[in-house]
Image (cartoon, rainbow, N blue to C red):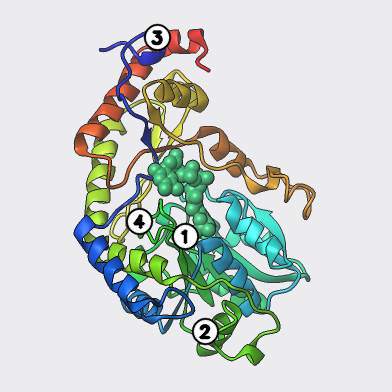
Amino acid sequence: MRLPACLGGAPAFSDPLHVGQINLPTWSAFEAGFRALFERRFYANHGPLEKELDARIAGILGVRHAVSVANGTVGLMVAARALGLTGEVVAPSFTFSGTGEALIWAGLQPVFCDVDPQTHCLTAELVEPAISSRTSAILGVHLWGRPCDPDGLETLARRYGLKLFFDGAHAIGCTHRGRLLGNFGDAEVISFHATKVVNGAEGGCIVTNDDDVADRLRACRSFHDGAPAAVDLRLNAKISEAQALMALLSLSDLPANVDANRDRYKQYRDGLVGLTGIRFVDYAAGEASNCQYVVVEVDPACGLCRDELMLALHAENILARDYFVPLHHMPPFQGNGPSVELPVADHLARTLMQFPTGQAVGAADVAGVIDAVRAILAHAPAVAEKGVS
Ligand code: T4K
């Protein structure tokens, strides 16, 4: 077993291996697409590529409407306004900060819930005690592309007369009981950030099966589209033609990129699953998934705590990440809503680690990461003693 880099061995990688390795189109497809864009001289304000993107997304997800936007965060803001939300919105604490900050930008107060320890997502049972007379909606997050109890949340929202929308930033192409995410609740928001499986450089899309909501979404996202009277406030949240083109190119590659994600995910799983103290976060069997995140929980039973293992990996040039800081501990939210104990979110914040994956991570790279994890854990007492920093 080789010596880990933090104990003086050679690093596993000469260049840093990041999480979120971006999916790029072929150079020839990129060049042809941008040549046509330059020749058309139409860059913004609802051009043909935006329309094509909206139609493609609606077709892929089987939804009535897709309304593309500049990024997932503004998509959540626009969705909240278009749904006419007021007061409080119940949301998970364990998510990317943009989920909660979008609510604040929309003039709403997030009330944070804990998440299920297996799925890392909300359940109806966790949400119900957080509902008050001020609640207008539930915002579920399909974290890592895992469905956050869409049936349970739909039933709960109906029972309390609440709107239900989803942050599906991670979830394009994932199913719940065979039904594609995007078809639950009042609306769902997808992200086309550069690090997502569909890379629009930046970008996002709001999908809905409700015609009235779609009208308000279109009016809300732009000063140039839809019927302004449909909403009380608008925003320049539209996608540019360049972003739409990138997203369209990426959508063409989606099946191949998902297949490659699945191969990397399985290779990581096979390589790590037997290690004591490393819990591999699986996707549900029998459901479609884009497999874009490779995530483990690190228990000190492996000999190291998560931060020790992660920093030892950094010494190998493997830039594993410790997503997320629970939102109820973050500055914009502290003191927002009742003070709560959210033990699962806190546990995940201490133990969760994301591995590099995406187009630039080949099978040899995954093998190198697995070897590095095994080498570090084989030397766990010495690594802990050295106190990696
Ligand atoms: N809801 C959820 C659940 C989300 O996860 C997100 C975004 C949103 C909502 C909001 O959607 P957007 O408004 O972003 O569309 C990254 C992404 O910036 C963010 O989109 C994503 N979630 C979040 C989970 O990850 P950071 O702060 O970790 O980004 P960054 O720049 O450190 O990227 C990660 C790694 O990727 C870097 O170590 C280097 C590599 N990278 C990144 C970029 C941007 C590259 O190699 N090339 C690149 O161009 O947030």
Question: What residue sits right under mark 2 in the picture?
Answer: 214
Q: Are marks 4 and 3 in contact (CB under 8 Å)?
A: no
Q: Amino acid at mark 4?
A: Val
Q: Are marks 1 and 4 in contact (CB under 8 Å)?
A: no
Q: Earlier in the sequence, mark 4 or mark 3?
A: 3
**Closest to the observer: 70 or 351?**
70
Q: Secondary structure at mark 2?
A: helix
Q: Amino acid at mark 1?
A: Ala
Q: Amino acid at mark 2?
A: Ala
Q: Secondary structure at mark 1?
A: loop
Relative vertical location of residue 57 with respect to residue 141 in this rendering, above or below: below
Q: Earlier in the sequence, mark 3 or mark 2?
A: 3
**x then y, percent, for residue 359:** 27, 47
Q: Secondary structure at mark 3?
A: helix
Q: Which mark is residue 7?
A: 3
Distance of label 3 from label 1 (alpha carbons): 39 Å
Q: At 36% from the left edge and 22% from the top edge, which residue is drawn?
A: 316
Q: Are marks 3 and 1 in contact (CB under 8 Å)?
A: no
Q: Amino acid at mark 3?
A: Leu
Question: What residue sits right under mark 4 in the picture?
Answer: 197
Question: How busy is the neighbourhood of tag 4: few (under 14 within 10 Å), some, or many (20 plus)?
Answer: many
**Closest to the observer: 118 or 95?**
95
Distance of label 1 from label 4 (alpha carbons): 10 Å
Q: At 23% from the left edge and 56% from the top edge, which residue is drawn?
A: 27
Question: What residue sits right under mark 1 in the picture?
Answer: 169
Q: Earlier in the sequence, mark 4 or mark 2?
A: 4
**x then y, percent, for residue 72:** 51, 63
Distance of label 3 from label 2 (alpha carbons): 57 Å
Q: Are marks 1 and 2 in contact (CB under 8 Å)?
A: no
Q: At 41% from the left edge and 72% from the top edge, which residue is drawn?
A: 241
Distance of label 1 from label 2 (alpha carbons): 19 Å
